[in-house]
Image (cartoon, grey):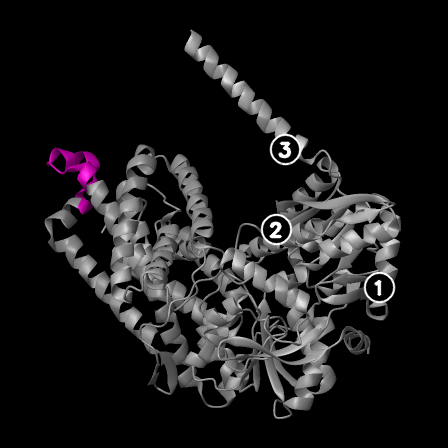
Amino acid sequence: MKGTKQVWIMMAVIFGLAVLLPSVATSADKYVTFGQTEALTGPLAGFGVPNKRIVEMAIEKINNEGGFKVKGETYKLRVICEDNKNTTEGAIAANNKLIHQDKVKIVMNFPTTPAIASQVVTEQNKVINLLGGLHHEMLSPKKPYSFRHVMDATVTAPAQVKWIIKNRPNLKSSWMTGADDASGAAGVDGWNGACNKYGIKVLGSDLIGRQVTDFYPILAKILPTNPDIIGGNTGDGGALLLKQAREKGYKGQFATPYAASKSWIKTGGAENLEGTLNIGVDATSELVPKGVRDFHAAYVKKFGEEPGAWSDWQTTPPYVIAQALAKAGTIDDVDKIKAVLEKESFNTPWGEVRYGGAKKFGIPRQLLFPLFISTVKDGKIVVLDRIDGAEIEKLMSE
Amino acid sequence: MESASCCSWSPILSRGKTVQLIIEMTINGVMLATSMMLVGLGFTLLHSILRVVNLAHGEFYMFAAMLVWYFMSHFHLSYPLAILISMVIVIALGLLVERYALRKFRGDLLSGLIVSMGLVFILQQGSLLFFGTETKNIPSAFPGNVAFAGIQISKERVVISLISLAIIVVLIVFVNRFKAGRAMRAVAQDEDAARLQGVSIRYISTLIMALACGLGAIAGGLMAPVFMIVPTMGLPFLLKTVIAITLGGIGSIGGAVLGALIVGMVESYVSTLISIEIAYIALFGILALILVVKPGGFFGTPYEYV
């Protein structure tokens, strides 16, 4: 039948064009592909989806500015993002696929639980792993291919608590809560460790499942101890806990060892979280690097919502990768790239940063950013103070 | 990492606030229970009468909460009107699901489970894509606290608990005193006999689905200002509710209420006195124990009805 034959021919032409055209369009450009895994589904998709978007924005900016040169050849970046479902098995599957099927030499993994799991695969295969995870045991001389671009509470809490001792001397006791996973435990451990070190009494602490939304029973235990500070994690459950503490009549200080976000403040209610101490980024503050402010604003303009609480730090890896490859003079010699990462500094939206923390972790694998001591004021994050990377490294190593 | 120890209650008790603590834990338990009752009742009615285990039932609760947020934030509707419209939409969605996804799997537990799990993912991911990734919040409809026996409780929670209890009373009256309610009970007891008596099974199926979805939607709308609204809030909530109705006896309204109270009290007391992780272990332990002794729960046997 003539009509049917024409339809088949048309479909074949369309299919052929669909396959060929993209490769025709990009055949002149050389790309370096790296891998990314995020929680794109599940409870932490609120972090993962914005992270994926902001990494794509960073790559687009780098590529639009001409890419980077390796031994005279111009390259652009490309990312393959897989869903790790915030599970260990999801992370292992995703990293195996990126490494063995997509042949990437560099991956980035977020958040903590999948990031820790990913190290099993990346260390074994000698693939550079840029970790967005919040547990201090991720970094060690036994894991030489792991580098981290977010700072966990064992890194930031000493600076944060020392600031509290100096500027809020009336706060003498604390009850911190966190999620019952690796990042939550790290947050609570880091905070309590810093409190014990600098003289804030730790009355107790709790790890609570992320699926919990009714905190009245836990607050019935916490509030009678009268802590000066009650803390929650920066998953939205943490904000809900603090909100419910206010409902129960608590009038004291709130704090979190991590970064608050607008979503977090909305969940807890601006009036309830007024004055909460945190290390969040105020994208309008002059103390925040311009590059970060620009990305933040561009994200809001493009997607009509704030980026996730950790997205501001996720802009860094594409810049680090591009510059590390250029300085190493190779796109696939992992050991040369690793050597560059250990020694060099990199220009990123956060300014010039480098990997440090050798004294604390035994190996320089912690990217050192400025830390912001922030508060919540009128529903917004307001930066009170800034502590630079060198000071953070000194305090965390004491 | 040191969590609060198993003896964390001792400093509290030593301050002579035992009675106040017991009152507080009991009130917290009741509030936890009322938050589960409406969703649990819908689930148990679906299971006992339609013979389906609809794991997507929690997603109707979530979807209703999302819709209430959507109508309030995008169309500036009032809270009661937003709940009403979201109820209508969720009921319509539920009827479509019943007609095209669940009806052919009546009585087939495994297939129904698989289909309903698929629905869970569709609704969750659909909500994520359509409503966005940010956590949603609704301002409190009843701001402020009330004080009772030296304990501060949010006014909102008190109102929600009272509304939930009122709805449960209305449901009990409907099931026992109205023709449609008696028809539902007849179908639950013996579908063939009910058919012979002139009861339209198709009508009852539709009515039950509408009722269950309506209850879930009301629960979603009422809880929306209290907790946060995220696409994944449905399944964990439903699983706790399933424990409650299994304890009480599937198919029994009284059992659903009792089961919810048991779950609420165990969670409240154990979370306060020990830790929330132990509370969940305790819940499952109690469930296993009860099912060994009484396989149908307190008030039911498999397919036993009100």
Res. A308 in view = no
- Please give the residue where the numbered disc 3 appears in the rendered image: A22
Magenta span of residues: B184-203
Q: How many residues crowd mark 3 within 10 Å: few (<14), some (14–19), many (20+)?
A: few
Residue A219 in percent (x, y) is at 48, 77
Q: Nearer the viewer, mark 1 or mark 2?
A: 1
Disc 2 chain ID: A
User: What amino acid type is highlighted by mark number 2?
Assistant: Thr
Q: Are marks 1 and 2 on the same chain?
A: yes
Residue A317 in percent (x, y) is at 72, 56
Q: Are marks 3 and 2 on the same chain?
A: yes
Which residue is most to the bottom? A170
Residue B104 in percent (x, y) is at 31, 32
- Please give the residue where the numbered disc 2 appears in the rendered image: A87
Task: Check the image and report above or below for B210 versus B115.
Answer: below
- Please give the residue where the numbered disc 1 appears in the rendered image: A364
Residue A205: quadrant of the picture: bottom right
Distance of mark 3 from mark 1, alpha carbons? 41 Å
User: What amino acid type is highlighted by mark number 1?
Assistant: Pro
In the displayed structure image, the side of residue A207 where residue A142 appears, left or right? right
